[in-house]
Image: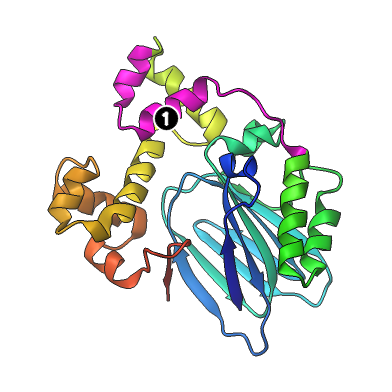
Amino acid sequence: MKMEFYRPINEVLQRYIEGYYFISPEENPERLHYWTFPNNFFIVSVSQNIELALQPNKIIIKTSEQENIKANFVSRYISPIEVIIDGSIKEITIYFKPLAINYFLANAHDLFKQENGLDFNPFADFISTMKAILDQSDRNLQQELLETYWLSKLNVKEPGLMERMITDIESGLKISEIALNYNFSRQYLNRLFTKNIGKSPSEFYRIHRFRKAIAKQKAMRSLTDLSYESLFYDQSHLIKDFKQLTNVNPFTFFKQVDTNSDNLWLFI
């Protein structure tokens, strides 16, 4: 199978969507089996003519003789997800930035009540439009149709309280300081984050720090330097977090995962 990742062309969408990829079928496809690792995105996948099974920390996709369009989402994962794809498939997967899905869906809060879900169908024209895009053979036209569709669903708002708090966390401000600055209790802060992005502030920060460490790793001379540069207490703290978020230690992770890729996948 052929996978191609793209950043949004439209400048407005660039604020809300990190990127999206297309999977295209190939003759005599090999089984695709990999681990994918936690991030803070809301992920929507749409596939054509498949059977889809969601299990705890595992997604299994097989080709189906029955014509269909299947859409699923992942709103929260704090441990690796195993993905198995058997057969030749067509798929679009979209990565919405933290909080961004709330600007497209009025009922996004309901989706954050579960970590993932099948039968994602937020609009009356969603399935038919996704089918039309998947049926296209021209990649440029697929991109244009996909971005035009999501732009039509966008409800632009001025940045609010949640945006400011996410910026605070990403800049390294402690959660206790954020709660104090906004005169919130830690419990109320947890409720706000869970409602709007599906994670607690501590989960969000932990994953943000993990991803930040990955981005900086090649410029660091050692794990010790990487630990302090990425705001871990020390190297043992970094190793502990990596084991919990990837199931392997950082030495193995950086050896086996292409950290220059747009998708951090450990192939099995």
Q: Residue at x 67, y 61 (%)?
A: 92
Q: Position of residue 48 (x, y in %)?
A: 76, 67
Reply above or below: 176 against 13: above
Can residue 120 be seen here? The reply is: no
User: Element under label 1?
Assistant: helix
Residue 173 part of the magenta-drawn span: yes
Q: Which quadrant of the rendered structure holds the N terminus?
A: bottom right
Q: Position of residue 143 (x, y in %)?
A: 71, 59
Where does label 1 land, which residue? 167
Q: Depth check: give the residue in front, 142 or 53.
A: 142
Q: Which quadrant of the rendered structure holds the C terminus?
A: bottom left
Q: Position of residue 204 (x, y in %)?
A: 41, 38
* Magenta stretch in the rendered image: 153-181
The 10 Å Cα crowd at callout 1, few under 14, some 14 to 19, many 20 or more, is few
Reply above or below: 207 against 79: above
* Relative side of 20 to 237, left or right: right
- Going by the numbered disc 1, the residue's amino acid type is Thr
Q: Residue at x 35, y 13 (%)?
A: 181
Reply above or below: 5 against 164: below
**Magenta-colored segment: predominant secondary structure:** helix
* Relative side of 180 to 2, left or right: left
Residue 63, located in which quarter of the rendered image?
bottom right
Residue 154 part of the magenta-drawn span: yes
Q: Residue furthest top?
A: 183
Q: Position of residue 19 (x, y in %)?
A: 57, 53
* Relative side of 157 to 216, left or right: right
Q: Depth check: give the residue in front, 105 or 110.
A: 105
